[in-house]
Image (tube, rainbow, N blue to C red):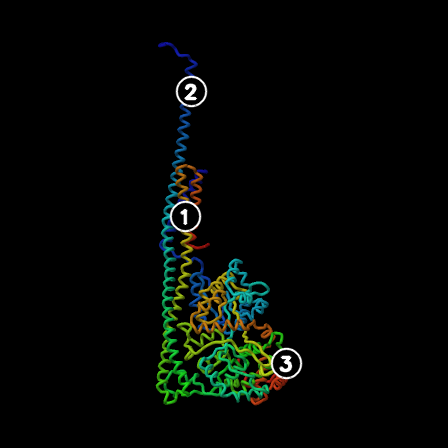
Amino acid sequence: MPGEKPPAGTSGEETALLREEVALQKREAEARDVREARSEELKNRVSVAAIILTTALSFIGNVRSDRGDTAGSARAAAESARRQGAELWAYYQMKMSEKASLEIARDRIRLDLAARGIQREDARARLDVLKLTGYEESVRDFDTETQRVFFRVQELEVQEDVQQRAAIEPSRSAFRYELGGKLITLALILLSVTILSSKRYLLVAGVALGAIGLLVALDGYFLFF
Amino acid sequence: MRRVWRGLLVDGLVVLGILVNVGFLLINLHPERPHLARRTKARILLRASEPRIRWMRENEFAEFAVANDVEFELVGARTFEDVHQKLIEEKQHPAGLLLADVDDEHARELKDGGLVRPIADGADPASLRQTLAELIPEATARGAVDGKQWYLPKRALVNVAVYLRPAIEDAYLHWEEDRKEIDAALKEANGAGLPKDFRLHRTPDRWDSFDLFVAAWTWAHHPARWAEASRRISAESSLAPVIAPRVAWPCGDSEDAADELLNALFRHGMTEQQLGHFDAAPLLDTLQWQVLFRKHGLLPAQCEKGGMEQREVNGLFHERKLAWASIDQADSLWLHGGARRDAEPGMPGAGDLSWATLPQGASAELSRGQAARRGRSFAFEEVHLWAVPIRSPDPRLAFQVARFLSQRGLQHREAEAEGMLPVREDLRRDYPIAFRLEWMQRMLDASFRQLERGTADLPAAWVGDDWDEKYVKLRQAVVYGRPKDAQVTLAAIREAVQQATRAPPPVPEAAHDAR
């Protein structure tokens, strides 16, 4: 009723309740602020880690591709040398079969002279000896020519061999860069999940995995292991 | 306080991350592997000539040096005795010798003298297993002493016969013109002459001592159109063929001559146990044949004057003055000259060269019309090994170098360019595919046939107990110390041997300084 005095005990309780409520709200607000601050801090750290790892990933991708190309071009050079060598070898064999036909012709004259019982010095053998000398000269020329071809084949084989070995080191590097890159990608995925879940341990796991990835990639350069 | 540390850690990680990124940026500018390690100097001792060392430096060591930051100094030694001497010096005054090239003949001696250490010490077991699995087990066994891998096989060499095909053709067609004289010469030695139904075999691969004697006789008694006279192809016949001995082997008292003598003894059926038995039939048979060759002028005059080393025999062949000789793979390539572009020019008409196994030893003495005793085609195989000197500065690097050099590509290239029998299993299996030149295949065919027909490790006592010197002195006394017209019967040879072994054998003046 208007003018009616409220009971003294009830008013004190309400005030206390109100005060409690205010204090609770204050605590909740403080806790929220702390949570938000932590979340903010977590996000900041995730962002910094992600930026570092993404930048590194970009450099690693670049250098991996360079090493891969180097290994690839060494292999291509080896393959090209092998192909050229094979072609030259076919040419060599063709020359050798031509030489064989000349050798047969030369041997025929020799056999003919032997069958007729005529020596090379004999005047009757003049034409035979002339032909024979011609064949012998041609056989010698074929020998010289095929030898040159063989030396070229030999050089190409050396080139193939050396290039195959030259591809080994860049291939090892490329493999390590590739592995490092994959580990960093996995670390970035973990960091993304960290933002969604706000779990600190995921940040630690992501950073640790990223660090391992960076070390593996660095080994791609130094090739310690 | 904790918060401060945490802040510092985070800041540190961020800075580290930035530095890593800067590092990767720099790597992008120079992606090749950096050579951060200090360049290591390594001395390698090689038993090789200067051109061979040059070839190895350019084609083998250079690649390893670039990849592994090593600066090689290749030290040459003329003989394996020199290598032995240098290893003794290295033990006393270490000069950083990383690796040395030794032969299997000295393997145990080097180990017992404490001059080398096991190559296995510098290798992890898996790498060693893998490396050994790629090599021929027989060669690997030569590098093992008392069950431990002390050495790694490097290459192998075996003597075979080299001949000129036109010369063989000539002997085959014309030997019977001299049959009466040959028979008479042999009758003087064995009382019978040539074996019953003797025919000169068409291919030297099937020859025995009689075939070699008959061919040598034919060549030494007729002008040889296929020899010096055929060095220039010409329709003119102004270059007159000459008569000369056309068979040669190292003679005199040199190390080469001793090795050749031991090969001849084993071809006539000698065994290691018979070393020092001066009444052994193989010794008498060998000496009887050598006396016959000398008596009838079938060997070059140098054997009378002071002896010949293998390089002199090769030199005569190179001038196309010989028709048949024994030779190893490295010298064969030098003789032919067509193994690589920068090789020394080979002999004129190298296309006429061919190779065969060494002739089977047969006694001049006959029994029922055939040789009374038969040996086999035989030649000692020499395996060269990589050894780690006892004071080697880095046994691990030493193994890496030896392993690098034994890989297929390099060994193939070395075998093709410098001449050797590959010690890799895959190369030995694939040699008809890997070595494609027809003449090189003929040489390798003969070499591998020789290994199948008869080969062994040099008896340790041959050099160790100085039998080499004793046998050479004996040969000099019996073959060259007697007059040319001395009796050539087996009894006369036996008596000469007994005389020579009773008293210190008189060394003919001609044999001095042959070494």
Chain on which label 3 sits:
B
- Report the residue marked by disc 2: A17
Which kind of residue does numbered mark 1 sit on?
Lys
- Report the residue marked by disc 1: A182
Q: Residue at x 53, y 89 (%)?
A: B180
Residue B473 seen: no
Secondary structure type for disc 3: loop
In the rendered structure, the answer to whether residue A194 lies left or right of residue B46 reads left
Q: Residue at x 51, y 72 (%)?
A: B449
Q: Give above or below for A44 relative to B86.
A: above
Percent coordinates x, y for residue A63 in the rendering: 37, 53
Task: Answer few, some or many: residues within 10 Å of disc 1's Cα (few below 14, many 20 plus, some between 14 and 19).
Answer: some
Closer-to-camera residue (B440/B385): B440
Which kind of residue does numbered mark 3 sit on?
Asp
- Report the residue marked by disc 3: B279
Picture quarter with the N terminus of chain B: top left
Secondary structure type for disc 2: helix
Which kind of residue does numbered mark 2 sit on?
Leu
> Mark on residue B103?
none
